[in-house]
Amino acid sequence: MDVKSNIINALKEVIYKEVGKDIEIKLEKTPNLELGDYSVNICFRLAKELKKNPKTIAEEIVEKLKSMNIEGVKEIKAVNGYINFYIDYNKFAKNLVKEIDNKGNDYGRGNKKGIKIILEHTSANPNGPLHIGHLRNAIIGDCLKRILEFYGYDVETHYYVNDMGRQMALVVYGIELFGLDKEKKKDHAIAETYVKINKYLEEHPEEEEKILELMREYEDALEKNENNEITKKFEFAVNYALDGIKETLKNLNIKHDIFVWESSYVRNGMVKEVIKKLMETGKVVKEETYMLDLSDFGIEKKMVLARANGTSLYSTRDIAYHLDKLSKCDIGIDVLGADHKLTAEMVKAALKLLGSKVPEVIFYEFISLPEGSMSTRRGRFISADELFDEALKRAKEECNKRGVEENIAYDIGLGAVRYNIARISPEKPMVFKWEEALDFEKVGCPFIQYAHARCCSILKEAENKGVKDEAVFNYELTKEEKELIKMLDEFKEIIKESAENRKVHVLANYLLELAKAFNRFYANCPILMTKVDDNVKKSRLKLVKSTKTVLETGLRLLGINCPGRM
């Protein structure tokens, strides 16, 4: 029994008879239960069309709705033009907890079978470790993958490896000059060499030509599909950095399905084919370099396609990658930093010129440090490794304070990092502060994990006492029980909204609100006390079990583990 669907369908039926067309209807939660559980303001929209007062329209519609006996609705009232619906909570709760019980961790799962999504995220340059800026990309991307899969899509994740261009040529040349510190984690050793070579070139600008020569030699070898000394140097440097990056991602519970190398599109001739096809559009002009005129798409700046010497640029290789990727899926999604907005628009315009579909792009604003912005080139950044180590350290301290086993510190630390980033809408910039991210006393992931652990503890105690959970609900439910039931029912809509709108933070914030609703329920509704009626005990235990299931599922979709005890 989906009460909200029943209400919407009944409203549509009545309104269709009045105006002769379907009207979109959205139920809103009322500010308090005295005004009902759900409300609609549709009568204000109908007033002009029906040439009547909204108050009169509401009263007329309510009379018709009452005669329909909407399943799950106990009472309907017209209040100053609004229509308020009061749910029959005993029926509603009984059906809801049975549904959650039957479906378990599949409760809320969607059915988008047959639609394939390729989602590209993280894709940090392999010239050092992931820093907290990359981490926002990686966590948004990984959470989104989990949510989309749960909603029913077939999802494949890509890490697009930028193994060409100046940055990797610098790393290769830096390794030749300075070597690598084998004692350090691999990506950190690469970063150290990268910082050294940048400083060296500042002092020896005449060496810059050697970097350009390395880039030319590498691309030349790729175009000839050769595996020679130069390609081996680049492959070694890139793989060395990627080994370290993959280790970091694994620690953060993130896994990519495929690592796609940028150079593969030079090797297979696709980049040259892209340039040739774009030339045929008549939109390419030769200035100092080959430029693509995108003014037809409202983009004033021309897109650089190739250098005058014919070597390709990142933009051209990016177009080739997208053509390939989008030909293999129904929907392509890119997670990119806000500084890529112009580039992304240019790539989309070029793809349209070539008759291709275009990707959806999720832009995120950057995380800055309180003392300023980060720079990999100068070696000023907080690495994801450093962040996670600090999270683990603080989680262990918290476990010791609470007298809890240290072996759950990983789950708490992982949750603190992932949740703190997932909960904020990507278009909002973040200033990363240790005390906010890892303060276990504030409302954050440990608060949600603790609500789940409390559910586990109550259910264990009930099992020891021989009290069974059962969907009885034959008594007048409290305000806290009603709020919790509505929150549990909302999970299906939250998954739909998070998946369809690609909004990870919607789920993250819902879980916090669910944990708060559960804590209010726990504080005001005795469960296992002897004076509590057996039917009330059984019903409330069912609510505890349902809450545990939804919290577990939701946290899993954010890539966060539930310790089960805290």
Image: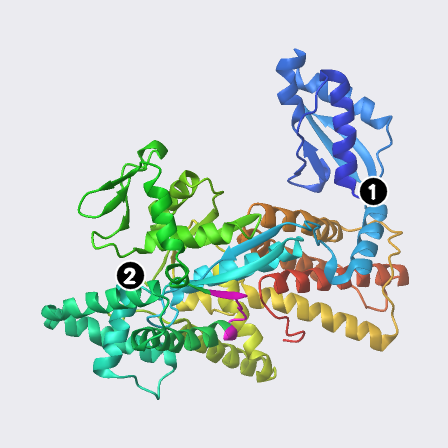
Q: Inspect this view and state whether residue 337 appears.
A: no
Is residue 254 inside the magenta stretch? yes
Residue 48 place in picture, x, y as percent: 62, 14
Instruction: Pick whichever, 50 or 325, lies toward us.
Output: 325
Instruction: Pick whichever, 120 or 239, lies toward us.
Output: 239
Name the residue located 47 percent from the left edge and 44 percent from the top edge: 358
Q: Inspect this view and state whether residue 297 appears.
A: yes
Q: Quadrant of residue 514?
A: bottom right
Instruction: Pick whichever, 192 or 384, lies toward us.
Output: 192
For the N terminus, the image quarter is: top right
For the C terminus, the image quarter is: bottom right
As drawn, the residue found furthest toward the top would be 51
The magenta stretch is 250-259
As drawn, the residue found furthest toward the bottom would be 183
Residue 291 place in picture, x, y as percent: 26, 44
As drawn, the residue found furthest toward the front would be 224
Q: Please name the amino acid that badge 1 sits on.
A: Asp
Lateral position of residue 510 relative to residue 309, left or right:
right
Is residue 483 inside the magenta stretch? no
Q: Which mark is residue 88?
A: 1
Q: Quadrant of residue 186?
A: bottom left
Residue 132 place in picture, x, y as percent: 39, 66
Lateral position of residue 470 relative to residue 388, left or right:
right
> Tag 2: Cα neighbours inside 10 Å, few (<14), some, or many (≥20)?
few
Tell me: residue 310, above or below residue 255: above
Instruction: Choose the circle earlier in sequence order: 1 or 2.
Output: 1
Q: Main secondary structure of the magenta part?
A: loop
Tell me: residue 164, above or below residue 341: below
Label 2 element class: loop
Q: Please name the amino acid that badge 2 sits on.
A: Ser
